[in-house]
Amino acid sequence: MPQVSSSYNPPLFFRNGHFSTVYAGLVRKVHGIMQKRERLVLPDGDFLDLDWSKSNTSTQKLVILLHGLEGDAQRPYITGSAKLFNQKRFDTCAINFRGCSGESNLKYRSYHSGATEDLVEVLNHLLNNNNYSEIYLKGFSLGGNLLLNYLGEGNQVPNEVKGAVAISVPCNLQDSCLELLKPKNILYANRFKKNLIAKLKQKQLLFPELLSDTDIACIKTLKDFDDIYTSKAHNFKDALDYYAQCSSKQFLPNINIPSLIINAKNDSFLGNECYPFHEAEKHRNIYLEAPSYGGHVGFWGKNNTTYTETRALEFFTSN
């Protein structure tokens, strides 16, 4: 499909990408959503915590929500999505990736942009224990990259999976990393790094033989983190190998269900290679919307409902 035109035209302040990003992440609050937690034990003995919120009306429609780097199922972009979907007769299941639910996971490994095996386990669990006839996937940033990988890398996607929406997706991980290392993103990068190192120190207590004080002291950038921990813990050669193997852009041509990607042109986390214009033009199942505004997982909307929350609902109900 060719690029989808966008109608997103927010008020003046929200046309600034940084303002939109910060407002959505630190200021926005979502109330009136009830979540119930389920723990899924994985085949390797680790676990995922799934946070459910359900429609007041019985439904066979489910949306699986996937958060971004160092996010969780309580972030406003997750709870805001869940609230709107619940109001429109969809149940939602928000996945907390390994180590992201407020409790350290049990293995040395954790989560990363290409850890699709955990999404496979969640889908198998949901289909074996529930009666949903329509399942949709919605992911943000890292979670959006992960779900696009899942759809295109060769997994046996269940027939019940009908569509996907991916927001603010670093479709080329190396390109996104280069952007995050630039001075314009230093505050975001330092915040991510601080949270990641705090978790890594918890890992060190459990696995001192795998991680030394010297290793942690060497982490000066997000790429260093991926060189020292992400790649080694998940069987990649180094950060660049991880980025190459797990960037979703290469898998887009293989996606067989309708999938909408919304990447704002003023998203400071995304370089030019993160906008798959060519792939979308050549593919009947890939819809790319690149509004001028929105920042990174921003997209302010009226009545505390973001533009991308409304667009995802429209996309899922039309496919």
Image: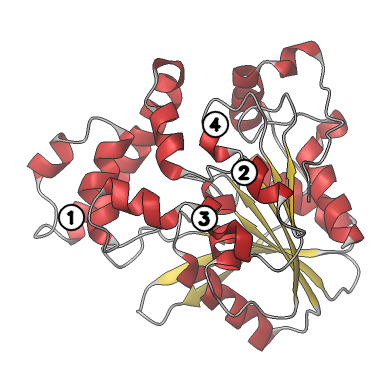
Q: Is residue 228 left or right of residue 180?
A: left
**CB within 8 Å, label 3 to label 1:** no
Residue 270 makes an appearance in the image: no
Q: x%, y% of residue 204?
A: 18, 53
Q: Which of the two labelled residues, at mark 4 and mark 1, occupies the earlier sequence position?
A: 1
Mark pair 2, 1: CA separation:
41 Å
Mark pair 4, 1: CA separation:
40 Å
Helix, strand or loop at disc 4? helix
Residue at label 3? 250
**CB within 8 Å, label 3 to label 2:** no
Q: Which of the two labelled residues, at mark 4 and mark 3, occupies the earlier sequence position?
A: 3
Front residue of 69 and 6? 6
Residue at label 1? 205
Q: Amino acid at mark 3?
A: Gln
Quadrant that contains the C terminus:
bottom right
Q: Is residue 316 left or right of residue 161?
A: right
Q: Quadrant of residue 218?
A: top left
The residue at 54%/46% (across/down) is 171
Give the vertical position of 274 relative to 190 (above or below).
below
Front residue of 270 and 39? 270
Mark pair 4, 3: CA separation:
15 Å
Q: Amino acid at mark 4?
A: Asn
- Disc 1: CA contacts within 10 A as few (<14), some (14-19) or many (>=20): few
Helix, strand or loop at disc 3? helix
Give the vertical position of 29 relative to 11 (above or below).
below
Residue at label 4? 272
Mark pair 3, 2: CA separation:
10 Å
Q: x%, y% of residue 212?
A: 9, 48
Residue at label 2? 276
Q: Which of the two labelled residues, at mark 3 and mark 1, occupies the earlier sequence position?
A: 1
Helix, strand or loop at disc 2? loop
